[in-house]
Image (cartoon, rainbow, N blue to C red):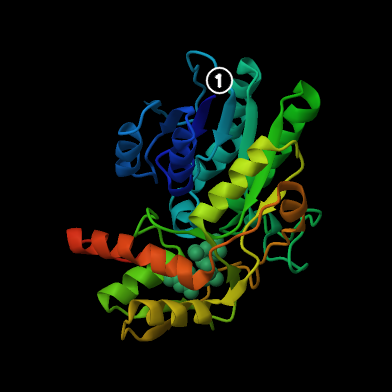
Amino acid sequence: MRILVTGAAGFLGGHLAERLLREGNRVVGLDNFITGARSNIELLRAMDGFEFIEHDISRPIDIDGPLDGVLHFASPASPVDYLEFPIQTLKVGSLGTHNSLGIALAKGARFLLASTSEVYGDPQVHPQHEEYWGHVNPVGPRGVYDEAKRFAEAMTMAYHRHHKVDTRIVRIFNTYGPRMRPGDGRVVSNFIVQALRGDPLTIYGEGLQTRSFCYVDDEVEGIVRLFHSDRTDPTNIGNPNEFTIRELAEAVLEETGSQSSLETRPLPEDDPKVRCPDISVARSLLGWEPTIDLREGIRRTIPFFRERIAASDGVTARTLP
Ligand code: UDP
């Protein structure tokens, strides 16, 4: 197959493109590098069957040649990134999704939208199953991401119903692993970088809020299975093992052997208090569930950050202002 991956320089887009190339597909990667890394594209360029286009998918583009799949992964995706790029986040979720769907329609390609657990907002149903409509503050600081992705889901379903485009929607829960940007500001990258540097681990609020962390290889496997399935409705792909942020901090300190202290910072506005996927749909329809637990995933992730810190003095965590 020949597949377009928007956001190919990003953490998930890059891993996904690599997996598709390894399976013998041809991949057209597209990115504008506002939050993606050129090093991810260099890794992909070293593989057979990869082409790259530097472009902002919020603006229309024609892609030469046939396409069998369009995977729309372009977007700032960590809270500090989408707070820094609020307008771009709204545009890539709305206009970027529209443009990507237009390409899929024109090429007769299957389309997959990278959606998010953020569509559930600060959830009042726990764990979150796909039928839950969510609890999102549209005008809060996180609204730029949450509402863009909710619009993207609505646009995807409209193209499916109206234009008969063959679509998939994956709701991705917190994912981590090697090749996360050290400064992307997410909790896993922040804690590992802080622990390795001997800096205090920054806990927002009491640290009693929960997240459910999925190792990147598990996430990519789930996404690929969904892409090849015939499931059109949104599908949760995430790890259902739930941890408090304090538990994550303890796990990172133990696995790195760090003596770092814990430092409390204010809880960001609208920070979801709990998050955990109900993955019964993925289990029954895709035969998928995560295989790598949090401790193992952290152990697999630490060497990447250790190397990055050794290679450059400027590698630090990025906390909210
Ligand atoms: N968090 C934290 N310290 C940090 C970064 C994040 O305590 O240095 C918390 C944050 O408040 C949230 C959770 O960790 O409750 C996950 O944050 P992240 O930015 O990774 O993603 P989110 O799940 O909020 O989109």
Give the residue at x 31% y 82%: 258
Residue 102, located in which quarter of the rendered image?
Answer: top right
- Looking at the image, which is closer to me, 150 or 21? 21
Query: What residue is disc 1 on?
Result: 67
Amino acid type assigned to the residue bearing label 1 in the image: Leu
Q: Is residue 301 above or below residue 145?
A: below
Residue 280, how many percent across, how many down? 76, 58
Residue at 77 percent across and 23 percent down: it is 164
Q: Residue at (43%, 49%) from the top-left corner?
A: 11
Q: Quadrant of the C terminus?
A: bottom left
Q: Residue 172 in the image: state x and y as whole percent.
A: 61, 52
The spot of residue 231 in percent (x, y) is 75, 40
Residue 198, percent across and down? 27, 79
The total of numbered circles placed on residues is: 1
On whether ligand 1 comes within 8 Å of the CB at mark 1, the answer is: no
The local crowd at label 1, few if under 14, some if 14 to 19, many if 20 or more residues have their Cα within 10 Å, is many
220 versus 31 height, above or below: below
Residue 19 vs 202, above or below: the answer is above
Instruction: Name the image quarter holding residue 238.
Output: bottom right
SS type, badge 1: loop
Tell me, yes or no, if residue 187 can be seen here: no
What residue do we see at 38% from left, 42% from top? Answer: 34
Q: Nearer the viewer, residue 195 or 150?
A: 195
Say whether residue 99 is left or right of residue 28: right
